[in-house]
Image (cartoon, rainbow, N blue to C red):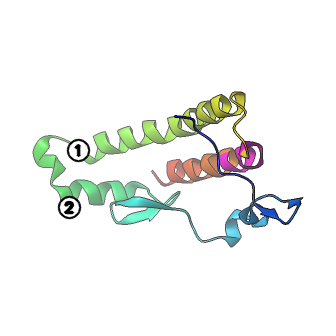
Amino acid sequence: MEARAAPRLTSGNVDSPPSYCHIMPRQRKPLRAALSIGGENRFGLVGAEQVENVVRTSHLESLDLSVAFLRSKFRVTTETVPDAVGRVLDEAHQRRLEGLEVIVDPMRAEIAAHCRKALERL
């Protein structure tokens, strides 16, 4: 099985970048996760309140999983995501996946920004 990035959009014979590339992140709707964390599914907006909500509503303290423990795990995960995604993008770039050159830099920047926001909220 071969992995490929989505092909670039074309209009007739004119090759153009995907239509979303020209839209600034602040002008787009927030990216959303498939599942929410403590009632929040918008990337970059998950913070301490949502972690506390997960512990409270899921009764995790009865399993000896405290808010502090879960917050520390969330922090570690959030700190590692930009580098992990970067490694995946680097590997995909080395394989010369078609269309990837258009999204690599914006994707890195946006993921890093969302992770910074989440860390600030913890």
Identify the residue at the far right of this view.
14
Callout 2 crowding tier (Cα within 10 Å): few <14, some 14–19, many ≥20: few
Residue 57's label in the rendered image is 2
Question: As shown in the figure, which amino acid type bears the numbered disc 2?
Answer: Thr
Locate residue 23: give its quadrant: bottom right
> In the figure, 106 relative to 98: above or below?
below
What residue lies at 63% left-to-right and 35% top-to-bottom? 86
Residue 11's label in the rendered image is none
Q: Is residue 20 left or right of residue 122?
A: right
Sequence-first tag of 2 and 1 = 2
For the residues labelled 2 and 1, the Cα–Cα distance comes to 12 Å
Residue 66's label in the rendered image is 1
Locate residue 3: give its quadrant: top right
Identify the residue at the far left of this view.
62
Question: As shown in the figure, which amino acid type bears the numbered disc 1?
Answer: Ser
Q: Position of residue 119 (x, y in %)?
A: 51, 47
Examine the residues drawn in magenta and state their main secondary structure. helix
What residue lies at 70% left-to-right and 72% top-to-bottom? 27
Q: Secondary structure at mark 1?
A: loop
Q: Is residue 103 left or right of residue 78?
A: right
Residue extent of the magenta highlight: 100-107
> In the figure, 41 relative to 92: above or below?
below
Q: How many marks?
A: 2
What residue lies at 79% left-to-right and 64% top-to-bottom? 22
Locate residue 48: give its quadrant: bottom left
Asked whether 102 falls inside the magenta stretch, the response is yes
Q: Secondary structure at mark 2?
A: helix
Q: Position of residue 84 (x, y in %)?
A: 55, 33
